Structure formats: structure tokens, C-alpha cells
Image: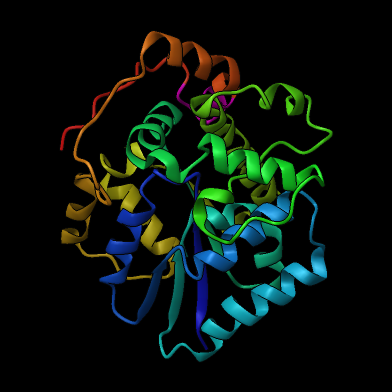
């Protein structure tokens, strides 16, 4: 019987690194953003209340369920920020699945999204298209990535202000909200099904890397830690600190989540490639 596990995050937080590391383990079928043109629109529709439990789980059963059922491996994993919005549905579909909540300093996440992905996330045109669809004023956008980044629900106190946010502010909101949704969904599961890890700690602690392997039921060797010591999925090997305006924007929108995840009082760090 194949056992599934899921690495959930905000994105730009080490999911590609975990995909690479865990792909190298024996008897593991590992994916990074599996079936993304299905899961990303589904995740946003789920968050916005545009699809119900039954429809969400039908789609997941026909994609993830089928993939796990037909896998020849002992373990099947997906490392994907898209799944952060779908945790209750995945937990119900796979009662034995385990979840790793992978987080990274939100300032580094926001900078990476903003400077490295450009129009792929929260650009003005694609965001306006999704907002108009959510408002019932336009037809559904196509399934490509740029169109499917969540906007606040109608009852969210930030829903009105969000319409005037610039791209960076939208990204900051995304980091805070996706981690809030993931943390609350995981808190509702039995403690033995979840593990919280910071990317920065994985890069510093072989013991934590070993703990994560043990949690997932995977073997760990001393040489396995090396892959965690340097960045992965780097399409542009450069690091930019937030400027003063961005720092203020991030603090206003995502400061409480930064504190909640254990980054309060820490200076923004520089990534060395």
C-alpha cells in the first residue's frame, strides 16, 4: 500500500529543495506541484467558497487519489504551495497522510516572488481578471498560473483595501494568509500527522532533517543533510533585501504572522548563492 505525504507552504520556501532531497530516497515517488493546472485553480476556488466539499474531493480523488493508487512506490509525495488551501480535503481523502508545514521568513518569500517571478504572480492584469470573476463581473480566467492567486474573501476586513494594493502588497498578504490557513487546518488534525519546520532551521540542523525523515517514515543517512545547505529552484541567483517602503508595507500587512511563525525580532538575512 502506498502512503502519501504532503509538503505545504507559501511557495518560495524550499518546496523544490525538499522535492529534490526526497526524490533521492528509495521507494519514493516525489512530485513538485503535481497537476498544477488542476490544483491551483481548484485551491483558489476552494478558498473563495466557489466549490464545495464534494466537488473538491471528487477532483482530488480523480487526480491525487488515482496517482497514489497506481503508484508502485511505498511513498508518494507532493511538495506544493497549492495544497496549503486544500489540507482538510486531502486529510479526509487520505486518512493516513502526513503533512509537513514548511515556512520561511516572509520577507525573503515576498522578495523572491516579487523580484524573481515577476508577472507570474499577482501582476495587475491577471489579478484584476480573477477579482472580476470573483465579483461576478467577468467570465472565469484560464487555468494558467498567473490568474490563480487568491484574493480576500468578501467578508475579509482587507477585501476593500486589497483592491488598491500594489503587487508587492498582494504578495505580502498572500504569505500571511496562506500560512494562516495552513496552520489552522493542520491544528485540527492529530498531532502525529503534522510537523512544523522552518527552512532556515533545516539548513542549519542535521537533527531536524533526520526528524523530518523519521516523521515521514523515510530512511536518513548522514550525507542526506548536504542537499539542504544551499538554495534550490533558483532561476536567478541573486538576493535583494526589501527597501524601506516594502519593509513598511510588509510589516503593516504580514507583521503579526512574521511574529507568530517565530521570525519576530530577527533582521532580514542575505542569501548566499
- The residue located at (39%, 43%) in the rendering is 12
Left or right: 41, with 47 as reference point: left
Left or right: 240, with 36 as reference point: left
Magenta stretch holds residue 204: no
Q: What percent of the width, then of the height, locates residue 183? A: 62, 43
**Residue sitting nearer the eye, 164 or 223:** 164
- The residue located at (15%, 60%) in the rendering is 223
- The residue located at (64%, 57%) in the rendering is 43
Q: Is residue 241 visible?
A: yes
- The residue located at (53%, 22%) in the rendering is 259
**Residue sitting nearer the eye, 69 or 195:** 69
Q: What percent of the width, then of the height, locates residue 99? A: 54, 59
Q: Specify the segment rendered in magenta.
A: 257-263
Q: What percent of the width, then of the height, locates residue 11? A: 45, 46
- Name the image quarter holding residue 64: bottom right
Magenta stretch holds residue 258: yes
Q: Quadrant of the C terminus?
A: top left
Left or right: 30, with 259 as reference point: left
Q: What percent of the width, then of the height, locates residue 38? A: 58, 68
Amino acid at each position: 500500500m502506498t502512503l502519501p505525504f504532503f509538503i505545504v507552504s507559501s511557495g518560495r520556501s524550499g518546496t523544490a529543495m525538499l522535492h529534490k532531497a526526497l526524490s533521492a530516497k528509495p521507494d519514493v515517488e516525489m512530485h513538485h506541484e503535481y497537476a498544477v493546472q488542476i490544483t491551483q485553480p481548484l485551491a483558489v476556488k476552494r478558498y473563495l467558497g466557489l466549490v464545495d466539499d464534494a466537488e473538491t474531493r471528487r477532483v482530488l480523488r480523480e487526480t491525487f487519489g488515482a496517482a497514489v493508487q497506481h503508484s508502485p512506490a511505498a511513498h508518494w509525495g507532493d511538495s506544493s504551495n497549492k495544497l496549503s488551501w486544500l489540507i482538510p480535503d486531502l486529510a479526509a481523502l487520505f486518512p493516513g497522510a502526513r503533512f509537513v508545514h514548511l515556512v520561511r521568513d516572509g520577507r525573503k518569500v515576498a522578495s523572491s516572488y516579487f523580484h524573481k517571478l515577476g508577472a507570474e504572480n499577482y501582476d495587475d492584469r491577471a489579478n484584476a481578471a480573477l477579482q472580476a470573476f470573483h465579483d461576478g463581473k467577468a467570465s472565469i480566467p484560464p487555468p494558467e498560473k498567473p490568474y490563480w492567486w487568491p484574493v480576500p474573501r468578501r467578508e475579509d476586513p482587507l477585501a476593500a483595501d486589497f483592491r488598491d494594493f500594489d503587487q508587492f502588497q498582494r504578495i505580502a498578504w498572500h504569505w500571511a494568509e496562506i500560512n494562516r490557513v495552513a496552520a489552522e487546518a493542520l491544528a485540527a488534525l492529530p498531532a502525529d500527522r503534522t510537523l512544523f519546520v522552518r527552512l532556515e532551521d533545516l539548513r542549519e540542523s542535521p537533527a531536524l532533517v533526520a526528524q523530518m525523515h523519521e516523521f515521514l517514515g523515510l530512511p536518513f543517512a548522514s550525507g542526506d543533510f548536504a542537499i539542504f545547505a544551499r538554495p534550490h529552484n533558483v532561476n536567478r541567483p541573486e538576493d535583494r533585501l526589501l527597501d524601506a517602503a516594502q519593509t513598511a508595507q510588509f510589516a503593516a500587512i504580514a507583521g503579526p504572522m512574521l511574529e507568530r511563525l517565530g521570525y519576530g525580532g530577527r533582521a532580514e538575512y542575505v542569501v548566499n548563492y
